[in-house]
Image (cartoon, grey):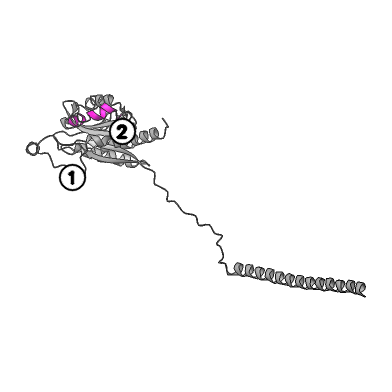
Amino acid sequence: MGKGGGCVTGKMVVRKKRDVDLAVGDVNEKLVGEEEEQVEHDSMSETVDAPPSSTTEHSTSTPTSTPQKLRIFIVFYSMYGHVLSLAKKIKEGVDSVEGVEGHLFQVPETLDAETLEQMKAPSKDPSIPTITASELPQADALLFGFPTRYGAMAAQMKAFFDTTGQLWRNQLLAGKPAGFFVSTGTQGGGQETTAWTAVTQLAHHGMLFVPIGYTFGAGMFKLDEIRGGSPYGAGTFAGDGSRIPSECELSLAEHQGRYTAGIVKRLAGGAL
């Protein structure tokens, strides 16, 4: 009995231990299953509670910058207003070309107020700024206007050119297109010589002289009226000061502005 009973007791112990292990295993599996269900439930809760993400991409619109216009400075001296009238029409012509704009400037007066009063010269237009030489490099092109003095430019304009020495030394105006428009007292008073004697100023600065040639067409050949202007640029006759620029002369001035603006635009675009 002792031997056989010992064996039976051992088998019973082993069987009970196995039953306990199985029971523990069932409990563990149940706990694991419950934990997995809880995790799955929590995951679903997070999915439901999470705020919906927007699938729409918000594009940031960058404002497009307006292209910088080419600038033509119309720099002039006018004692009695004749050159001023041409300058304003030239500006109209420049402004009519897309992408180009004209800016009017006066050069400084060299005569004192008493002398100007004795010469019965009207007051200068205060709305037009007086330019300094240091501002010239800001322009993409320049058109200079002045009355004649014995077939050459007036002293006021020559005095202004004489202040451009520093620009000349550094060649800051080199390569810039430039042209002229003039006023004379009589038909033989220098409509051509006043312009072509001024070309020396451009040559020393390395600037590009842009004459209008005969691009004005039939208007350059009219003989039925007195008309200023030449292939060098627009012009008018002042006479004793009482004559005002004619419609034909003003049209030629406007043409010069438009023509020069077109040349400047082509140069800037590399079309020439």
User: Which stretch appears magenta?
Assistant: 157-173
Residue 126: mark in rendering: 1
Q: Extreme front residue here?
A: 2
Secondary structure under tag 2 reads helix
Q: Nearer the viewer, residue 52 or 185?
A: 52
| Residue 178: quarter of image | top left
Q: Main secondary structure of the magenta part?
A: helix
Whether residue 254 can be seen here: no
User: Could you tell me the amino acid type at mark 2?
Assistant: Gly
Residue at 28% x, 28% y: name it. Answer: 170
Secondary structure under tag 1 reads loop
Residue at 12% x, 39% y: name it. Answer: 121
Badge 2 density bin: few <14, some 14–19, many ≥20, Cα 10 Å: some
Position of residue 160 measured from the top left corner of the image (x, y, whole percent): 19, 32
Residue 144: mark in rendering: none
Q: In which quarter of the image is the N terminus?
A: bottom right
Of the residues tagged 2 and 1, which is closer to the observer? 1
Q: Residue beneath label 2, please?
A: 219
